[in-house]
Image: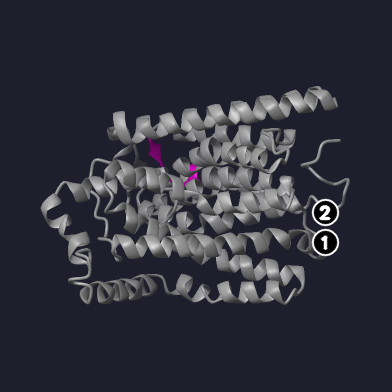
């Protein structure tokens, strides 16, 4: 189970469920939904469900041990890299659990609302990371995380899915129109981030920077409106574009809606603390490891939120369900650009922090080239292993650039001269 893929995956999942309503409607009511008259049966089902979840992903379940360790090392004020490392490992399984619980909740709330819920909760880990970053005034890290998530989805996840899928089947096909819509939305994101960045770089006066903060905040509101329109397009008017032809063989939910909702809330709250501890430890980590903040933001932090999606995108690509795989990767990129980025700017507005759409010009160039490359590769509705490799190699190059950047004051690719 992945996370932001859902914007796409969920309508399909619920569609296949709701088509045979008679069977499906029984699930919530029989699982202890009748005000406790069958309460003895509900928990045992949920208990079995929890055991199923743990059995399904033993490695991730074992990684949950880092959650209490992460809390402990933060409270004991141990060295920053230890706090960073433990919380980094703790958030990966938490992100997977949030994705899983969201899926179980959305399976029972109907198609459209389920799609909305999945789309919103899909990138909750990135949102929490960005909120923690803004509260700790780590604007560079926040902007790098936003950019890094788009890059890792567009180049790393999609490239790996195409590459691994291509090894199993020489040519794979997917919905060309769905892919085209997502590429256009990504191009629009580049436009929205690009103009404030270029504007701020050309006119480097304080009064102009004030204007740019205003421009960013209003642009963000318009971007959020576009995202709502995109959701309506995807879940309402043009659902067929984003659905594969074959019926989807999704597994039934493991938990009752109520239990899943409670666990989802708990997991989200715990993740909030873990992300906060993680961001808090970045300064010390940068100093002791000698890597740049940008490397942590662009390469490392996106791994946390996207680990579950990487896994899902690759496994469905192996099963030759490229529409679903593309929904995970390209869908996540669209969400990062149109939902999480403007959301973060507005959070900065609420906290009185000058978080803007002014990303550094080098980062803008990386984003522009990545979107251009992805658009040219996704244009034909078919994929093979070579196309996957063409997406992966640029990602490795970007990672190398940021890795060798250094952590000195003057060596930064993210601060303006």
Residue 183 shown left or right of residue 131 in the figure: left
Looking at the figure, which quarter contains the C terminus?
top right
The quarter holding residue 367 reads: top right
Compared to residue 174, the image places residue 229 above or below, namely above
Asked if residue 204 shows in the view, the reply is: no
Q: Which mark is residue 407?
A: 2
**What's the CA distance linking mark 2 and mark 1?**
7 Å
Q: Which mark is residue 373?
A: none
Q: Which residue is mark 1?
A: 287
How many numbered marks, from 0 up?
2
- Magenta segment: does it hold 382? yes
Among all residues in the image, which is located at the extreme left? 22
Residue 392 shown left or right of residue 310 in the figure: right
- Magenta segment: does it hold 238? no
- Report x, y in % for residue 387: 48, 42
Of the numbered discs 2 and 1, the one sitting upstream in the chain is 1
Looking at the figure, which quarter contains the N terminus?
bottom left
Query: In the rendered structure, are the residues bearing label 2 and label 1 in contact, judged by CB atoms less than 8 Å apart?
Result: yes
Compared to residue 213, the image places residue 48 above or below, namely below
Q: Which of 308 and 127 lies nearest the eye of the viewer?
A: 127
Dot 1: few (<14), some (14–19), or many (≥20) neighbours within 10 Å? Answer: some
Q: Nearer the viewer, mark 2 or mark 1?
A: 1
Element type where label 1 sits in the image: helix
The quarter holding residue 44 reads: bottom left
Q: Which residues are magenta?
A: 381-388
- Report x, y in % for residue 29: 19, 61
């Amino acid at each position: 189970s992945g996370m932001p893929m859902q914007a796409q995956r969920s309508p399909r999942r619920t569609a296949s469920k709701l088509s045979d309503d008679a069977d499906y409607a029984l699930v919530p009511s029989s699982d202890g939904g009748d005000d406790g008259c069958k309460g003895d049966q509900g928990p045992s089902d949920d208990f079995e469900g929890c055991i199923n979840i743990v059995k399904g992903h033993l490695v991730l379940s074992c990684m949950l041990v880092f959650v209490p360790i992460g809390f402990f090392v933060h409270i004991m004020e141990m060295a920053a890299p230890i706090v960073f490392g433990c919380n980094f490992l703790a958030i990966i399984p938490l992100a997977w659990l949030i994705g899983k619980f969201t899926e179980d909740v959305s399976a029972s709330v109907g198609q459209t609302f389920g799609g909305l819920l999945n789309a919103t909760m899909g990138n909750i880990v990135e949102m929490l990371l960005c909120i923690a970053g803004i509260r700790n005034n780590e604007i560079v890290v926040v902007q790098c995380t936003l950019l890094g998530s788009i890059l890792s989805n567009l180049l790393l996840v999609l490239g790996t899915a195409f590459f691994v899928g291509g090894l199993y089947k020489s040519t794979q096909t997917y919905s060309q129109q769905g892919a085209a819509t997502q590429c256009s939305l990504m191009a629009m994101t580049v436009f929205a981030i690009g103009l404030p960045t270029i504007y701020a770089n050309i006119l480097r006066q304080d009064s102009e920077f004030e204007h740019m903060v205003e421009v960013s905040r209003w642009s963000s509101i318009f971007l959020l409106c576009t995202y709502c329109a995109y959701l309506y397009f995807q879940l309402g008017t043009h659902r067929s574009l984003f659905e594969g032809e074959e019926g989807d063989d999704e597994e039934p939910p493991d938990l009752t809606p109520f239990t899943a909702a409670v666990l989802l809330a708990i997991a989200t709250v715990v993740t909030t603390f873990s992300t906060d501890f993680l961001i808090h430890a970045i300064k010390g980590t940068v100093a002791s490891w000698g890597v740049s903040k940008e490397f942590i933001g662009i390469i490392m932090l996106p791994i946390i939120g996207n680990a579950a999606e990487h896994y899902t995108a690759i496994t469905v690509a192996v099963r030759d369900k490229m529409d679903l795989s593309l929904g995970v990767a390209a869908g996540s990129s669209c969400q990062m650009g149109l939902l999480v980025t403007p959301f973060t700017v507005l959070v900065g507005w609420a906290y009185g922090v000058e978080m803007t759409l002014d990303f550094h010009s080098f980062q803008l160039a990386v984003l522009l080239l990545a979107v251009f490359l992805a658009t040219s590769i996704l244009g034909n509705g078919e994929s093979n292993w070579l196309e996957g490799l063409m997406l992966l190699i640029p990602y490795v190059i970007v990672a190398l650039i940021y890795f060798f950047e250094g952590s000195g004051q003057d060596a930064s690719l993210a601060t303006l001269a």
